[in-house]
Amino acid sequence: MPTVADQFIEVLVQAGVRRIYGIVGDSLNPVVDAVRRSGDIEWVHVRHEETAAFAAGAEAQLTGRLAVCAGSCGPGNLHLINGLYDAHRSGAPVLALASHIPTPQIGTAFFQETHPEQIFSECSHFCELLSQPEQMPRLLRSAMQAAAGRRGVSVLVLPGDIAERQVANPTGTGTVDCEPPTVVPPEDQIRELADSLNRAERVMLFCGAGTRGAHSEVMRLAGKLNAPVGHALRGKEWIQYDNPFDVGMSGLLGYGACHEAMHKADRVVLLGTDFPYDNFLPQARTVQVDIEPTHLGRRTALDFAVLGDVGETIRAVLPLVRQKTDRSFLDRMLKEHADLLERVVDAYTRNVENQVPTHPEYVADILDDVAAEDAVFTVDTGMCNVWAARYISPNGRRRVLGSFVHGSMANALPQAIGAQCADPRRQVIAMAGDGGLSMLLGDLLSLRTHRLPVKVVVFNNSSLGMVKLEMLVDGLPDFGTDHDQVDFAALASAAGIPAVRVEKPGEVRDALGEMLRRPGPALVDVVTDPNALSIPPRITGTQVKGFALAVSRTVLSGGVGKMVQLARSNLRNVPR
C-alpha cells in the first residue's frame, strides 16, 4: 500500500517536477526513500539547505516551471528561509517541503520543535500544515498551484509520521499551470495613456523585468515617441540589447544618461518595473504600466496607472500614438550617454592590462568576451553585481540571475547549481565574490558530487567591497571589511575541482578561456584590486563630502565595457 510520501512524489512527477534539492535526514527520510523507490525524480544532495532553496529558485527563474526544495524538521527547514525569501521576492515558483516533528509531539517543546507554518508565512503565498493523510493530494496540489499561479513560494509542512502513513485517497491526475496571465488594460486606460503620450514633448521609457518578451514592442513605442529608453537592473537582460534608444541604467549600480533623461522628460513611463529606489525617481510626471496591481504607485507619485501586461498594453496603444518628428530630446540624451561612457571608460582602460592587482572590471570585460552567447551568469550580491551590470552584454539569449530584490550574499554558487541542473548542456558561470563564496563554500563539493560543469570565477579582493563603499559615502572609515587573503584555487583543488589562481592581468584571458573549455566543474581565483569601487551616476553632496573625508586613494570606476560601443553606434542615428 503506498504511503503519503509515495503519493507526494507521484503528484510532483505528474506536475513535471524533475528534482528536489535538499539534505536527507530525520523526519524527511520517508520522502527521501520514496524518491529512491520512484526512479522518476532526482534527489540533488547539497551541503546546506540555504543552497537548496537558492538552487530551486534559480531553476524556477530559468525554466519558468515549478521547482522544489526540502528541509528536515527544525534546523533543517529553518536553513531554507533565506533562499525562499529570495525566490518569493523574485517571483520564482518554488515549493518547499518543510518536514516536521511527529504530530503527537507538536506543542510540547519537543527536540528540534519549531512552527514552520508560522515561520515561513511572510515569505510565501501558501503555508499550511498537512496533519492527516486525508488532506492529500488536494493540499499538495493547492500548494503547487499557489506557487505557480501567483509566482512565488509555497510551503507544505509535513510531519514525518504522517509521511509514513498509508494513503487515504486515490492520487488521481492533475497538472500545474505555470503560464503567467496576459492582461489587456481597459479601453479607457489605453486612451488615457495614448493622450498622455501624444501631449508630451519629451517622453522617457524606464523598463524593468516586466518587459520580458516585449522587446520589440518597447522598441516600436520608443521609435514612435523618439523616446530614450533606460532600464533597472532586472530589466537589463530584456531591453538593453539591439536598442538604438538606450541611455543606460538608473539606481545604485547605474551608469550613463538614464537618470538625466528621466528627470528632464515631461512624461516618464515605467514599464514593468517595481524599481525600489524612490529617491532616483522624479516623483512627478509619471505613468506606470504593470501586470501586478500592488506595484502601481508604491514607489512614486503617479499621474495615472495602467493595469496590464506590458506587451499587450503597448500593442493596444500603438495605433493611437502619433509619430513624433522632433528628435532633439532623444539625440541630446544619446550624446550625453555616449559622452558619459567615454569619460568613465578612459578611467579603467589606460594600461589596465598591466596593473597589479588586477582591476575587477577588466576580469568582467574579458569574461564577457569569452563566455558563450547563451551563457547563464549567476552573480553574487555586492561589487559582483556592479561588474555584471556594467560589463556582461545581454543579447536576448544570455541570462543573468542574482539576488537582485532580496539582496542576499552567497547566492551565486547555489543559483549556478540550480541553473546547471535545469540545463546540463548550457554554459553556467558563477561570478562569485570572495565574501559570498566563503559563506556557502561547502557547496563547491556539490559541484564535484554531481559532476556539474559550473564554472566559478572568484573576484578575490579580500574585502567586502560594497560594504566598504557604504561606509565611505557615509563618511566612516572602513572597518571590519577586510579579511585574510584566501587561496580559493587551492581549496577547490583539494576538493577535486580543477582550479587556477591568477595574480597578473595578462593571465586573465587565457585562464578564463581554459576554464570554459574544460569539461566538468572548474574555478578561476582572480586576485583583484580591493580599491576598485563604484559610485552611482548621481550622488548627494553629503555623500561626496563623506567620501572625501573617509578616503584619499580610491579608484572610482564607472566603466561599462562594450556598452560604449553600443552608445557610439547609436550616435550614427543622430543628425550632425
Image (spheres, rainbow, N blue to C red):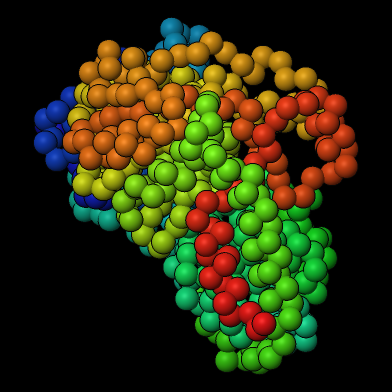
Q: Is residue 40 left or right of residue 548?
A: left
Expressed as whole percent of the image width and height from the top left, the position of residue 419 reads 33, 42
Residue plotted at (85% across, 26% down): 549
Which one is nearer the viewer's eye here, 164 or 426? 426
Which one is nearer the viewer's eye here, 132 or 120? 120
Q: Quadrant of the C terminus?
A: bottom right
Q: Is residue 84 visible?
A: no
Expressed as whole percent of the image width and height from the top left, the position of residue 429 reads 36, 40
Q: Image quadrant of residue 196? A: bottom right
Residue plotted at (40% across, 63% down): 396
Q: Image quadrant of residue 395? A: bottom left
Q: Is residue 93 left or right of residue 385?
A: left
Image height of 520 relative to 371, above or below: above
Residue plotted at (57% across, 91% down): 319
Q: Image quadrant of residue 111? A: top left
Expressed as whole percent of the image width and height from the top left, the position of residue 519 reads 18, 36
Q: Is residue 320 visible?
A: yes
Image height of 118 relative to 205, above or below: above
Image height of 504 relative to 248, above or below: above
Which one is nearer the viewer's eye here, 225 or 552? 552
Q: Quadrant of the N terminus?
A: top left
Q: Is residue 293 left or right of residue 137?
A: right
Residue plotted at (55% across, 84% down): 316
Expressed as whole percent of the image width and height from the top left, the position of residue 137 reads 29, 43
Numbered marks: total: 0
